[in-house]
Image (cartoon, rainbow, N blue to C red):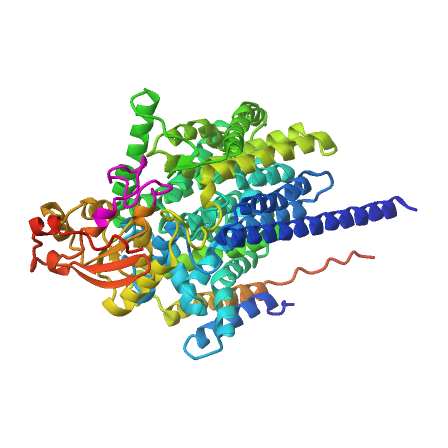
Amino acid sequence: MTQAQTLAYERVAVTAANFRWKVAVIRATVAGLVCVALADAGSVRGYSNAGILFWLGLLLVFVPTAIAVLRPGAERRERLQLILLLGLALYLVKLLGSPTAFSFSDEFIHLRNTQDILRTHHLFDANPLLPTAAYYPGLAAVTAGVVDLTGLSPFAAGVVVVGLARLLFSGCFFLVAERVTGSDRAAAVAGLVYAANPMFLPWSSTFSYENLALPLAMFVVYWIGRTRHQGRRAADVLTVVAIGAIAVTHHVVGFALTAVLAGWWLAEHLRVVPLGSRVGRRAARRKVGVMALVAGAAVGVWFFVVAKPAPAYLLTNNIVPAVRQTISLLIGQAPRRQLYTSGGHIAPTWETVAGAAAVGIPLLLLAPALHRAWRQPRRAALVVSAAIAVAFPLSLAPRFAPDGVAISGRSAEYVFAGMGCVFGLLAVTRIPTAATKRIAIAVALLTVLFVGDITIGTAFYERLPEKSHPTGYPWSLQRDVIDASKWTRANLGIHRRFGANAIDAFALATYGEQNPVAEDDVWPIFFSRTIDASVVRRIRATGVDYLLLDWRMPDGVPPTPGYYFGTQEPGAGRYQHAFPRAALEKFDGSPCVASVYAQGAVEIIDVTRISDGSCTPDVALLSTRPARRGARR
Amino acid sequence: MRRPFPAGPAAAAAIAAVTVVTAFFSVPIVVRTVLGLLTVFVLPGFAVERTLHARPDPDPDADPDAQPFVWVGFSLAISVVTAVALAASPIGISRESFAVALGGFTALLALYAGLRSMLHDVPHEVVPDG
């Protein structure tokens, strides 16, 4: 047998082995998804052990993929395909939890944007759920376009858009990490680390503007890395188009892309880059700098000039309170947020341990990973990755502050990109391809990271769908509220001003196309035990026409995020007792109020006569009247 | 010696053109869905990539495994910009306007890519003497 024939036979054997591995991983993934689907169905029926099937399903999806991409003999294409499969499978895990309708809070915000564009054919119709979202119409506009062009429902179109964006992200992140680390094996580890971030499973799969913008940003980084030294003007024009798409889709992603490109340009000034001639290097570096400027200009102009509510929303309402509260916490002037407890629920102990391990492992490995990255010669992109990864310990502090948890959680989507690259590099230098024991340890560590970060990212009782007839105050939208919302659209018309709790407001704004008043403006109307002068004043000030009374509110304290209406209501985040029933009963018998809908636990009352001033309730009379609704439910 | 009009751009131009035409008529929902999904998520990026490719000097960094991401990435970016631009303009976004803008752009670009590719002479084979 000649040497060429021997090589050919070996090649065939390797290809056959790789194919067998791929089939095995696909089978395990399908089995995992079946387990998750069964867990979802069991949870709806109220089976308490459904969580075991859920975790089994996730392990069947993650562990075989981790083994397959780390094992010796795996080829580049196989690793890329398996990382894509993992991204898609975890997207399907979210979809299986709610296969027929959107269910996450942000999804309703962008569904409303989409509905508005479909109805008006134009942009910037006021979004009552989040005014800023209307000024970042990229996701809603393209989804509306897909609905128009294909005839799909907004839900189906949104699922396709975000699903393709998820595949784009998984693929481009692999390709970027491969360029950064110089190894497809390291890129595969980076993909696994990124898939383990606390937001990847539920949050990054939702119909939300960030989940379109982030994949586009990763694509832009890949595209610039690939074409910057080619001198093709058409490629640069296309890069600008993609940056424009990001600028009109999401604010934070736009700023993050600008920062990454600027950091990349700066890092190349400080380190030598092995790219062709000196002139070629300078041109390539200049292109990164120019694109950073383009991104900064596009994102800045849209943020400050077009998206007028965005600066106040992002800075005043989110970043500044989070930073302020974190600083207060660090200097001992604010109480620490209790982790793994909310709404009277306490997570199982093993989840607390897993969460601590998922934070401890990357903290321990970060220093050697950064050291390894620093020793890697002449790779500016690796310096940028290391700089992003360094932010990981800093991003943990806000998690202990009640106002900082959202920012800490969301930062994981960015920080884990850098961490993935440096950990990937560490993995390939520490684990020779044939070192089975070390591969097993790496897979075990990655699995702990994956499991622990899921416990961090989502409250344990919110990972599976809520049971069909929940006890206590529900954390998800209920069927009767959706029916009531549809009734309002059919019988009251659209865009009526409603007062409702935070969860029900999502249904009113989307299924009913009504305009719920901001929850922090409306809670005083509900909390007062009588229709006193302050309630009348508040109804008139907010201009509400109708109130949606959810008679489940007195059944239990609100779960995550710990309020019925908004963060400013009394007791938000620290409820011990449920909403007082008397506060809902106060509307009974008022001659100024008319009940227009009552079905199940939902009642809609008309308060337009108070709102327009044609009727003023007799406060003294109402407070002495006995309540009629004691046995309502 | 000229190359024939390449099949990829020809198919892309044809599908995009059919999408534009069918936007103005009633067609089965399956047809509309397939055409629409291709026109939004694949064809614009494909046409762009073919246009970049249709030049005598090949892309030294071309990676067959990465091609689908280039198609989807640019398709999404172009679709977002087109949808936002239409909705911001007095025309507004509708089935017809989106189909004409996106499908028309894609068809024209694919034709340009095909023509450019066709008009480039195939390099002559060098036959060694003797």
Quarter of the view holding residue A59: top right
Residue A230 within the segment the image draws in magenta: no
Residue A581 within the segment the image draws in magenta: yes
The answer to whether residue A386 is left or right of residue A513 is right
Task: Please determine whether, in this image, residue B51 is positioned above or below residue A398.
Answer: below
Counting from the top left corner in percent of width and height, residue A469 is at: 42, 54
Give the residue displayed 72% in from the left and 47% down from the top. A21
Screen quadrant of the C terminus of chain B: bottom right
Q: Which is more toward the observer, A65 or A123?
A: A65
Q: Which is more toward the observer, A328 or A478?
A: A478
Counting from the top left corner in percent of width and height, residue A276 is at: 57, 37
Whether residue B6 is visible to the viewer of this picture, yes or no, is: no
Give the residue displayed 24% in from the left and 38% down from the top. A570
Task: Please determine whether, in this image, residue A412 is positioned above or below residue A551.
Answer: above
Residue furthest to the top in view is A331
Counting from the top left corner in percent of width and height, residue A355 is at: 50, 32
Whether residue A445 is visible to the viewer of this picture, yes or no, is: yes
The answer to whether residue A176 is left or right of residue B103 is right
Counting from the top left corner in percent of width and height, residue A547 is at: 22, 56
Give the residue displayed 66% in from the left and 49% down from the top. A28
Q: Magenta part of the protein: which range?
A: A556-584
The majority secondary structure of the magenta stretch comes to loop
Screen quadrant of the N terminus of chain B: bottom right
Residue furthest to the right in view is A1
